[in-house]
Amino acid sequence: MCACVLIVEQNAMLALEYAQHAFVLEQGRVVLSGSAQPLETIQLSCLRISNT
């Protein structure tokens, strides 16, 4: 049995710590998607995502 949980969080790095798969949205559009671990290594600052 598996479960799916939708987390909406502005702190992308925090959310990626707990996710297995992630979608990163910018202005309502998916700009990145995939396994959460590789997404943590991408420079999210270029997408104007803030960790504050």
Image (spheres, grey):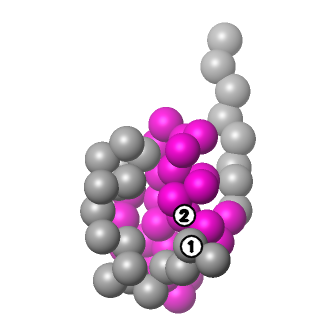
Please rate how many residues cluster around mark 1, counting C-alpha atoms within 10 Å: few if below 14, some from 14 to 19, many from 20. few
- Give the camera-side residue of 23 and 42: 42
**Left or right position of 38 against 22:** left
| Residue positioned most to the top | 1
The circle drawn on residue 31 is none
**Left or right position of 33 against 14:** left
Residue 46 versus residue 23 in the image, above or below: below
Amino acid on which the number 1 mark rests in the picture: Asn
Label pair 1/2, CB-CB below 8 angstroms: yes
State the residue at coordinates (30%, 55%). Answer: 41
Q: Residue 7 lies in magenta, yes or no?
A: no
Amino acid on which the number 2 mark rests in the picture: Ala
Residue 8 is situated, as x and y percent measured from the top left of the image, at 69, 62
Q: Quadrant of the N terminus?
A: top right
State the residue at coordinates (61%, 67%). Answer: 11
- Give the camera-side residue of 4 and 20: 20
State the residue at coordinates (54%, 79%). Answer: 50
Please rate how many residues cluster around mark 2, counting C-alpha atoms within 10 Å: few if below 14, some from 14 to 19, many from 20. some
The circle drawn on residue 12 is 2
Label 1 residue SS: loop
Which residue does the numbered mark 1 point to in the structure image? 51
**Magenta extent:** 9-33
Residue 26 is situated, as x and y percent measured from the top left of the image, at 48, 82
Residue 49 is situated, as x and y percent measured from the top left of the image, at 49, 79
Residue 40, image quadrant: bottom left
| Residue positioned most to the front | 52
State the residue at coordinates (54%, 64%). Answer: 12
Q: Residue 30 lies in magenta, yes or no?
A: yes
The CA distance from mark 1 to mark 2 is 7 Å
